[in-house]
């Protein structure tokens, strides 16, 4: 049976976004294609009250191109939603008619509250909302959508006309922005947000999430200042207020020509970023925030999630970390994993972890990473059995894992890369803690050896930790000579990391 493909289009006030995805069994999806075109309709509406004819023609042209991409990808359904600029423009209805006539794509212009609900759906499916509840800010060209909720659902939603295009058109005429314009902009944003702050206060949000291009550009600029390598994915990337203030000062002190040379700043956002950082500065202040976490998922993914009839159960699971496991399993499934072997290795690795707590001093999150890496350790065989550890690490890094920050993605990749042998190379994965990786690898290697024949003959472990010796008794349902041999071959790292000899015996289950 042919897989179903669904496309979602976000006709945003700054950019039009397209995502085409293949729906997987169980309702999860895998992106097939993504496209973006920056049109800046929100700024035009802010200046003129309408969308000029040439901009309307350009918008229709973008949608024609999106339609061709959808047709080429064999898309079964296209869902398109228009937002603030189309809502507010005096000729918004005429522009929608032109787009529909030119592209054949039906466009639903949605309310700000509806937009916020769809965005929160994406945030909940793409970010671990922990600690909860979380407050989300999606800063577009025409408006900002603010939501509060947790893994169980949405608790508050609002939309305010504070988009970067709207604010730039109304307040910014100088370059760099002068003191009077900045003060007026700050006061306006604070005044509009004051009732929102009052509404949100009783909900006591504990995590702040930012989505949209402006927030992502700020995050990239922060990441570029931390080191030479910016993470491939910014999803769940967190920056502090202090780091942001350094970026803010540089942005507001530079001309557009100087900002063009800023690492991490998208060229076409050079003249909008000033209003963006002033907005974020006020948000940090009035909501009393210390840091911000990035979500790469926003309205387009929310539209897509709603359009898919069968959803990934993790998208509505009350456990905020369920999205991580679902994402790992989805990647493993796409790579035609040896599921029984992977799950057995995960069980054995966690058993070793649990029964040697006095040795390793690691925490429950480390255990979770170990379990997830165990599930993924052999996915590189999907590419080739030769060098599968290297192929697997590449698949992990590029697998669009949800709910993991960039350092955690690199940690998973490092565990997959070196699960067979060798020493972790910090230069390959600069965000990882190599001591943590070595400790987790010690468990993963032995567990992999204990299912060497992929028969599941070893069903459990009993571990005794002594001052100089760790004794592992493997409970087996049959002949486990191969497994005993496999584990003994992999014990060298364990003995070196924990400064204990390891002896392994097999006993009847």
Image (cartoon, rainbow, N blue to C red):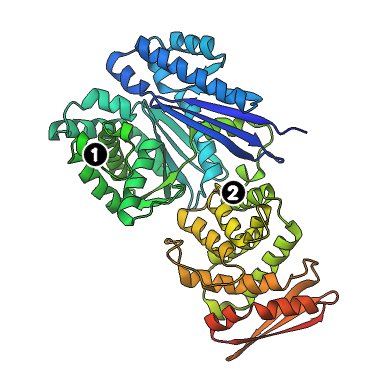
Q: Quadrant of residue 484?
A: bottom right
Give me the residue at 19% from left, 30% from top. Answer: 184
Q: Earlier in the sequence, mark 1 or mark 2?
A: 1
Q: Secondary structure at mark 1?
A: helix
Question: Taking 386 as reference, is 474 left or right?
Answer: right
Where on the picture, by quarter, is residue 68? top right
Q: Is residue 290 visible?
A: no
Which residue is denoted by mark 2 in the rendering? Answer: 323
Residue at x 74% of width, y 70% of height: 451
Q: Which residue is mark 1?
A: 259
**Would you call the spot at circle 1 few (<14 residues within 10 Å), some (14-19), or many (20 or more)?**
many
Q: Are marks 1 and 2 in contact (CB under 8 Å)?
A: no
- The residue nearer to you, when weighing 87 against 176, is 176
Tell me residue 471's x, y (percent).
67, 86
Residue 406 shows in the view: yes
Among the 4 quarters of the image, the one containing residue 162: top left
Helix, strand or loop under label 2: helix
Q: Position of residue 102 (x, y in %)?
A: 51, 11
Residue 480 to residue 325: above or below: below
- Quadrant where the N terminus is found in the figure: top right
- Marks 1, 2: nearer the viewer: 1
Q: Is residue 115 above or below residue 481?
A: above
Quadrant of the image containing the C terminus: bottom right
Q: How far apart are the two marked residues, 1 and 2, measured between alpha carbons?
A: 37 Å
Q: Residue at x 35, y 24 (%)?
A: 40
Question: Number of callouts in the render?
Answer: 2
| Above or below, comparing residue 494 to residue 83 in the picture | below
- The answer to whether 431 appears left or right of 258 in the picture is right
Outermost residue, right side: 478
The spot of residue 63 in percent (x, y) is 50, 19
Observer-nearest of 472 and 292: 472
Mark 2: few/some/many CA within 10 Å (<14, 14-19, 20+): many
């Amino acid at each position: 049976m042919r897989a179903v493909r669904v496309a979602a289009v976000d006709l945003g006030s700054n950019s039009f976004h397209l995502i085409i995805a293949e729906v997987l069994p169980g309702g999860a999806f895998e992106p097939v294609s993504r496209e973006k075109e920056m049109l800046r309709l929100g700024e035009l509406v802010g200046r003129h009250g309408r969308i000029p004819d040439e901009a309307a023609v350009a918008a229709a042209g973008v949608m024609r191109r999106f339609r061709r991409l959808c047709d080429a990808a064999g898309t079964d359904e296209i869902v398109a939603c228009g937002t603030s600029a189309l809502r507010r423009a005096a000729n918004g209805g005429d522009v929608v008619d032109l787009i529909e006539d030119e592209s054949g794509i039906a466009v639903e212009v949605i309310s700000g509250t509806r937009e916020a609900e769809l965005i929160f759906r994406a945030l909940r499916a793409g970010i671990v909302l922990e600690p909860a509840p979380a407050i989300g800010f999606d800063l577009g060209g025409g408006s900002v959508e603010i939501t509060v909720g947790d893994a169980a659902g949405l608790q508050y939603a609002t939309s305010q006309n504070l988009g970067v295009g709207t604010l730039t058109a109304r307040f910014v005429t100088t370059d760099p922005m002068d003191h009077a314009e900045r003060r007026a902009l700050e006061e306006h944003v604070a005044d509009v947000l004051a009732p929102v702050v009052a509404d949100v206060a009783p909900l006591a949000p504990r995590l702040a999430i930012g989505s949209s291009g402006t927030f992502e550009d700020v995050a990239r600029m922060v990441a570029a200042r931390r080191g030479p390598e910016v993470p491939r994915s910014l999803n769940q990337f967190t920056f502090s207020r202090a780091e942001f203030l350094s970026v803010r000062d540089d942005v507001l002190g530079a001309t557009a020509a100087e900002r063009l040379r800023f690492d991490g700043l998208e060229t076409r956002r050079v003249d909008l970023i000033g209003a963006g950082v002033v907005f974020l500065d006020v948000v940090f202040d009035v909501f009393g925030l210390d840091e911000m976490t990035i979500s790469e998922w926003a309205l387009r993914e929310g539209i897509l999630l709603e359009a898919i009839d069968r959803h990934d159960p993790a998208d509505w699971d009350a456990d905020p970390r369920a999205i991580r496991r679902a994402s790992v399993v989805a990647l493993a499934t796409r790579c035609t994993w040896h599921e029984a072997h992977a799950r057995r290795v995960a069980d054995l690795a966690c058993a070793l972890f649990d029964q040697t707590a006095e040795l390793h001093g690691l925490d429950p999150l480390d255990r979770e990473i170990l379990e997830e890496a165990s599930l993924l350790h052999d996915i590189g065989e999907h590419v080739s059995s030769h060098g599968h550890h290297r192929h697997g690490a590449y698949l992990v890094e590029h697998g669009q894992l949800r709910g993991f920050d960039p350092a955690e993605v690199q940690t998973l990749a490092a565990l997959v890369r070196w699960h067979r042998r060798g020493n972790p190379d910090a230069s390959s994965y600069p965000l990882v803690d190599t001591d943590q990786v070595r400790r987790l690898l010690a468990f993963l290697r032995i567990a992999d050896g204990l299912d060497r024949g992929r028969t599941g003959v070893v069903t459990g472990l009993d571990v005794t930790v002594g001052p100089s010796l760790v004794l592992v008794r493997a409970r087996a349902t049959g002949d486990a000579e191969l497994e005993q041999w496999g584990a003994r071959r992999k014990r060298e790292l364990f003995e070196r990391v924990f400064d204990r000899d390891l002896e392994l015996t097999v006993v009847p289950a």
